[in-house]
């Protein structure tokens, strides 16, 4: 199955396949981007530990794979808490990949996006001083709090009283973003999955145990579409050194057929 096998939302919330077109059409005719969630997770489900330093879960080979996924994306999104905590730059690090983007008529770097309800974003964050264009989605209150602090550094867009992720994707679609990579953290991944807005999930499982209840988890409790009875499609499993990379398609489910887990009796 190729990355361009996207799934689109229909009016009743179910998903339909759109082969070869990563963008997704909604009822208004606006093309939403194809949304890929990317995360590195410990075996016990954490995405960091509780220490002040960022826990590196991937290995060098896997970080390079992530760089390639970034290079294939039109935009990269992270939550404001990840910016405040890790101060990431979110760049395509490979010169060769950046050169390929430019040769193909694309910007050297993907658009960088963050989401903040409260607008607590320091202009000194590395996010605002590296790479290409930056975009901040926030609320009316967030805009008021930010004032002119990010002037010249980023475009700040209010989505009203709250940040609605469907509205955010429609806005990105209007800007011509066809492929969005979401890099976390847990609150952001939870929101995309809970709203049925993630087309693909790249889950890199690192051979690490964190075991700290204060550390952030990949996902927080939420009312996920279909609940625990719904099985996603597992599209690929790849070994990346000591990391296992699982590729899921969250909006698709396997049709129940004979011999599939739906029909099987659990061992007693
Ligand atoms: N292992 C990995 O692959 C990976 C990747 C990324 C991050 N991380 C880790 O993840 C941790 C941070 O994750 P997190 O879950 O605490 O935070 P997060 O998801 O990065 O960011 C949460 C913030 O996003 C904004 N936000 C979230 N939902 C919103 C909504 N519906 N409307 C408006 N704003 C919304 C809020 O910002 P405001 O508070 O500004 O309103 C919220 O505090 C860090 O420890 C980081 O190291 C790990």
Image (spheres, rainbow, N blue to C red):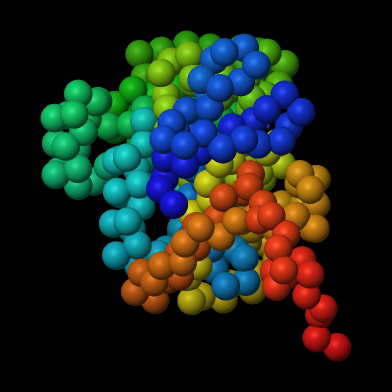
Q: Is residue 259 left or right of residue 103?
A: right
Q: Quadrant of residue 28?
A: top right
Residue 29 in percent (x, y) is at 57, 13
Residue at image x 65%, y 16%? 27
* Residue 219 seen by the camera: no
Instruction: Tell me if residue 176 comes above or below residue 49 in the rendering.
Output: above
Residue at image x 33%, y 31%? 110
Q: Is residue 97 left or right of residue 138?
A: left
Q: Quadrant of residue 131?
A: top left
Residue 253 in percent (x, y) is at 67, 52
Residue 257 in percent (x, y) is at 71, 63
Which residue is farthest right? 268
Residue 226 in percent (x, y) is at 79, 48
Which residue is farthest bottom? 268
Front residue of this view, candidates 40 and 31: 31
Front residue of this view, candidates 185 and 52: 185
Q: Is residue 173 left or right of residue 71?
A: right
Q: Where, quadrant-wise, is the C terminus in this rendering? A: bottom right
Residue at image x 81%, y 80%? 266
């Amino acid at each position: 199955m190729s990355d361009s096998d996207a799934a689109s939302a229909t009016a009743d919330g179910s998903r339909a396949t759109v082969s070869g077109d990563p963008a997704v059409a909604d009822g208004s005719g606006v093309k939403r981007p194809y949304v890929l969630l990317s995360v590195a997770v410990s075996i016990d489900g954490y995405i960091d530990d509780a220490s002040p330093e960022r826990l590196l879960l991937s290995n060098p080979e896997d970080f390079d794979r992530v760089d390639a996924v970034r290079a294939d994306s039109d935009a990269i999104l992270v939550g404001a808490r990840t910016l405040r905590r890790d101060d990431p730059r979110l760049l395509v690090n490979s010169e060769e990949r950046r050169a390929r983007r430019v040769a193909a008529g694309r910007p050297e770097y993907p658009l960088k996006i963050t989401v903040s309800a409260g607008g607590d974003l320091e202009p000194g964050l590395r996010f605002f001083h590296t790479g290409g264009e930056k975009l901040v989605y926030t609320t009316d209150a967030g805009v008021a709090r930010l004032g002119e602090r990010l002037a010249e550094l980023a475009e700040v867009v209010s989505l009203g009283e709250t940040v609605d992720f469907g509205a955010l994707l429609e806005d990105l679609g209007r800007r011509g973003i066809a492929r969005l990579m979401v890099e976390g953290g847990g609150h952001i991944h939870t929101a995309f999955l809970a709203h049925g807005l993630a087309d693909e999930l790249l889950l890199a499982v690192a051979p690490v145990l964190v075991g700290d209840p204060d550390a952030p988890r990949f996902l927080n409790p939420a009312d996920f579409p279909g609940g625990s009875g719904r099985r996603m499609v597992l599209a690929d499993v790849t070994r990346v050194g000591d990391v296992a990379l699982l590729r899921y398609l969250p909006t698709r489910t396997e049709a129940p057929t004979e011999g599939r887990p739906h029909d099987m009796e659990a061992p007693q």
